[in-house]
């Protein structure tokens, strides 16, 4: 474990324990099967980054209430709901090293438990009594749904542009990070300048986080990744490394890469050759550089806050986003 990761975990150990408790305490299903399926996705090794960001953002704004951990559970329920639905839509076989819920419990149950988790998230947000909080969560859900639809529409499309890719990951990933941070400013009654700074931090962190995630499909093996190697590519997800390589490849290489990308039955040897071509065309370096630019913007947004242990932890999380390998 890196020194940076150890420092972060030491700083947030109490928060993570409280978040875990909130996730279990606020689930409240009436049926054991719902609890089992929800637990399969919720308690299978998730990083809890989004709820943690919400708690830290509330603290940096001086929040002294007792609803931050509860609301952080709503964000994780929403995230888990999207994972249940996405795995079914994409035909994913593994999630965090375990069989995807739709394979273990069946498609109908996976869909309905996803719906339940979304409803729990909305119920928790409504309990704040603040229309603005409910509005943030509702808008977030709309954005994430449209991001997934957009990605599905362009499935396997080698003509996907970098700008369009950025719009997809903004909606499907970055807005969740952004909302997690912004809603804390609302709960803490923070000035708009600080709420906006937190939103900027979350947005830029989320963009970088997804870019790093998109590298993992090519650079990690199954035990590290928690899903099959090349799963994103088999699902037709054209991500930034591929976009960059296709844009810069010689015609022969570009045609070969296009054939592989559009063939779900590509072999391990084909995938390994593709990784070699992506490396040769600087696709991974380009993606890492793009992610690093978003991280610098995220860190700059925290200049709106004075020095504190919480601010340092949030800066450390930004730096670790580029270093992580899971």
Image: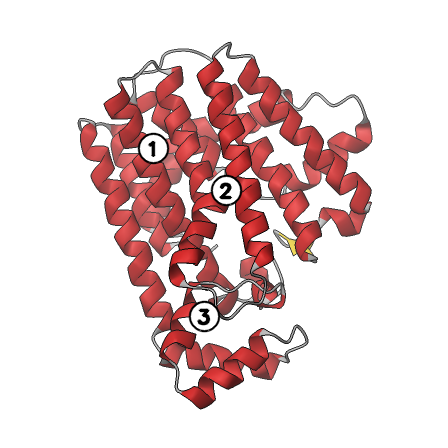
Q: Are marks 1 and 3 in contact (CB under 8 Å)?
A: no
Q: Residue at x 57, y 82 (%)?
A: 270
Q: Is residue 79 above or below residue 242?
A: above
Q: Confirm whether residue 244 shows in the render.
A: yes
Q: Secondary structure at mark 2?
A: loop
3D distance between C-alphas at marks 3 and 2: 27 Å
Q: Is residue 166 above or below residue 236?
A: above
> x, y percentage for residue 196?
29, 29
Q: Residues within 10 Å of mark 2 (few under 14, many from 20)?
A: few
- Give me the disc on residue 242: 3
Give whichever of discs 1 and 3 has the lower sequence position: 1
- Residue 234: assigned label: none
What residue is shown with label 1? 199
Disc marking residue 47? 2
The quarter of the picture where residue 199 lies is top left
Distance Cα–Cα, label 2 vs label 1: 20 Å
Ranked by sequence position, the earlier of labels 3 and 2 is: 2
| Mark 1 surroundings within 10 Å by alpha-carbon count, few (fewer than 14), some (14 through 19), many (20 or more) | many
The residue that appears at 62% across and 63% down in the rendered structure is: 235
When asked about the image quadrant of residue 35, the answer is top right
Q: Position of residue 243 (x, y in %)?
A: 43, 69
Horizontal and vertical percent position of residue 139: 50, 30
Measure the C-alpha gap from mark 1 to mark 3: 29 Å
Pointer 3 local density, CA inside 10 Å: few below 14, some 14–19, many at least 20: many
Between 241 and 209, the one lying in front of the other is 241
Q: Residue at x 47, y 63 (%)?
A: 239
User: Mark 3 or 2, which is nearer the eye?
Assistant: 3
SS for dot 1: helix
Q: Position of residue 118 (x, y in %)?
A: 63, 30
The residue that appears at 47% across and 51% down in the rendered structure is 168
């Amino acid at each position: 474990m890196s020194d940076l990761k150890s420092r972060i975990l030491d700083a947030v150990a109490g928060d993570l324990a409280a978040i875990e408790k909130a996730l279990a305490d606020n689930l409240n299903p009436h049926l054991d099967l719902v609890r089992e399926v929800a637990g399969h996705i919720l308690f299978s090794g998730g990083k809890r980054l989004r709820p943690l960001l919400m708690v830290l953002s509330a603290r940096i704004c001086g929040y002294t209430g007792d609803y931050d951990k509860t609301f952080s559970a709503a964000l994780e329920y929403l995230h888990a709901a999207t994972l249940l639905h996405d795995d079914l839509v994409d035909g994913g076989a593994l999630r965090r090293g375990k069989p995807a819920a739709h394979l273990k419990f069946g498609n109908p149950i996976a869909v309905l438990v996803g719906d339940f988790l979304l409803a729990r998230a909305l119920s928790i947000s409504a309990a704040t009594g603040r229309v603005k909080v409910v509005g943030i969560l509702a808008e977030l859900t709309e954005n994430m749904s449209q991001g997934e639809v957009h990605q599905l529409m362009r499935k396997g499309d080698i003509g996907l542009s970098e700008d369009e890719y950025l719009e997809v990951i903004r909606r499907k990933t970055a807005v969740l990070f952004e909302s997690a941070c912004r809603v804390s400013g609302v709960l803490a009654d923070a000035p708009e300048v600080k709420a906006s700074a937190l939103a900027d931090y979350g947005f830029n962190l989320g963009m970088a986080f997804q870019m790093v995630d998109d590298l993992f499909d090519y650079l990690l093996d199954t035990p590290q990744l928690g899903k099959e190697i090349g799963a994103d590519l088999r699902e037709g997800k054209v991500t930034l490394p591929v976009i960059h390589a296709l844009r810069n490849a010689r015609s022969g290489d570009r045609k070969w890469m296009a054939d592989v990308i559009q063939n779900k039955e590509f072999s391990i040897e084909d995938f390994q050759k593709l990784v070699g071509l992506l490396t040769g065309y600087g696709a991974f370096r380009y993606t890492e550089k793009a992610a690093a630019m978003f991280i610098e913007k995220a860190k700059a947004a925290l200049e709106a806050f004075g020095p504190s242990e919480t601010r340092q932890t949030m800066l450390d999380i930004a730096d670790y986003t580029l270093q992580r390998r899971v």
